[in-house]
Amino acid sequence: MRFGNGLATAGAVLCITSTSFAQGGTTVFRNASVVDPTSGLTAGRTVIVEGGTIAYLGAAERVPAGAAIIDLNGRYLVPGMIDAHVHIGDFAAARRALLSGVTTARSMGVSHFVDVGLRDLARDGAIEAPEILAAGYHVRPQPADQLFMNAPEMVDLRDNVRGEEAMRRMARLMISRGVDFIKTNATERAGLPETDPRTPYYTTEELVALVDEASKGGVPVAAHAHGDAGGRAAVVAGVRSIEHGTYLSGTTLDLMADRGTFLVPTIAVVADLTMPGGDYDNAVLNVRGRHMLPRVREMASRAHARGVKIASATDTGYGSESVLRLSHELIELVSVGLSPLEAVRSTTVVAAELLGIEDRVGRVAVGFEADLLVLERNPLDDIGAYQDVLLVMNNGTIVVDRTEF
Ligand SMILES: [Zn+2]
C-alpha cells in the first residue's frame, strides 16, 4: 500500500461497535472542534443531536434531560463522508463502508437491483448501512447476463444495447425499478484485462437519448469514461457526472467547467491496480495501472485548476479483500492540488450537490442530518486523519465509538 501502514487500514476496518445509543435519542457533543465544509473550523462548540437531526450548534453548555453526553476534548467533528461511486452488494459490505466513515454512498452498478433494496432497508433503519442512492445495472452494449434474468422482456437487447430506442428502453426499465441515478458506460472498462478503456461505446445521439429519457423520470445520468472521445460525447449529451475521466483533454475539461458537469476521478482505485492484493490483483491490470495512474492524477489536477467540480469516490465494493478506503482518495486529491478543505468539500457538500441532497446532507449545521464523524486530528492540517475514524454517527445513531480508547 502506498498510504499509511497496515495497522491504520486495519483500524478502519476492524472496529468495535456500540449500540448503546438508540436512534431517535438525544446526544450532546461537548468541546467539539467543528469542521463545517461551508463555514470552516470553529473550536469549543456544543452540538446537540435530536432524533437524527442536528438541533443545536453553538457555544452554550446546554444539556437536555436524558441526553447522552460525549466530551470530545477538542477533537474534530466533521460531516460523514459521501462515497459517490461504490459497488456495494451485501449487508457486510454496506457495514464496512459505514464503519470507515461513509454515511452516504451512490451505487454505480450491481446485479439484481440489490442497491434498490439496500437503499430501502437503510432508509428504514433495518440494517447498519450508509444511505444509498441506487443505479441498478450499467447501460452498456453488453449488459450483465443477470439483467435479462431480472427483465426477460429485454432479451432482444442481449449484446445489443445500441441505437436511441434501445437506450430509451433501458432508461425506462431502470426508472421502473426505482433507481435514483442511471449509470452508463461511455467507454470500455479499465478493470478487465481484455478491454481498452479508451474505446468509446456510444455516439452523442445515443447518449442524448438516454439522458432525455432519464430526465422524464427525474433521474440524472452518470457516465463512466476513460477515453476523451467517449467522455466528451457524454458531457455534450448532458450527463451529470463523468466517472474516472483518465484521458480527458483540456477541451473536454473546459466544457465540463462551463456546463457544471461533475468529475469523479477515482484516483485511488487506479493506484490499487498497481499494488498486489486489494480490489484488483492481475498482471495485465498492474501494467495498465502503471501508465494510467500518472495520467488520471494529471487530469484531476488540470480539472481542479479549471474549476471543475470534483467529488470523491472509491469505486470499490467494500469486499472483505478490499484495502481501498475513501480516505485514500482524499489523500490523492490533496496530492493533485486540492486544499485539505477542498478535499473535505469533495466528500461532503460537492458530492451532496452531485447527488441532489445538498439541502440535508454534508454539513455540520442545524437542520442537517446527523451523519457525523469524530477525528483525532485536524483534517485541514492533515487529510490523512480520515484514515482513522474514532466515532461514526449515522442518522443520529452511533454505530462505532472508539473515543474512549
Ligand atoms: Zn465502478
Image (cartoon, rainbow, N blue to C red):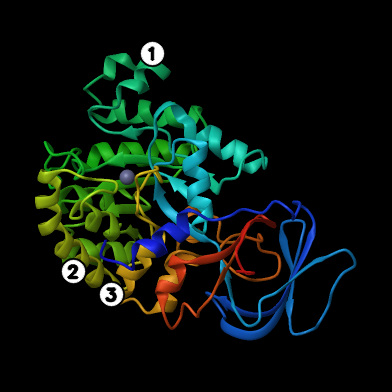
The residue mark sitting in front, 2 or 1, is: 2
Q: Is residue 10 left or right of residue 122?
A: left
Q: Is residue 82 left or right of residue 250?
A: right
Q: Which residue is mark 2?
A: 298
Q: Residue at x 34, y 76 (%)?
A: 338
The picture quadrant for ligand 1 comes to top left
Mark carried by residue 153: 1
Does ligand 1 reach within 8 Å of label 1's beta carbon? no
Mark carried by residue 54: none
Return the residue nearer the eye: 402 or 350.
402
Q: Is residue 157 visible?
A: yes
Does ligand 1 reach within 8 Å of label 2's beta carbon? no
Q: Which residue is mark 3?
A: 335
x, y percent for residue 229: 15, 50
Q: Earlier in the sequence, mark 3 or mark 1?
A: 1
How dense is the environment of label 1, judged by Cα within 10 Å: few (below 14), some, or many (20 and up)? Answer: few
x, y percent for residue 45: 69, 82
Does residue 356 lie above or below 388 as drawn?
A: above
Return the residue nearer the eye: 322 or 28.
322
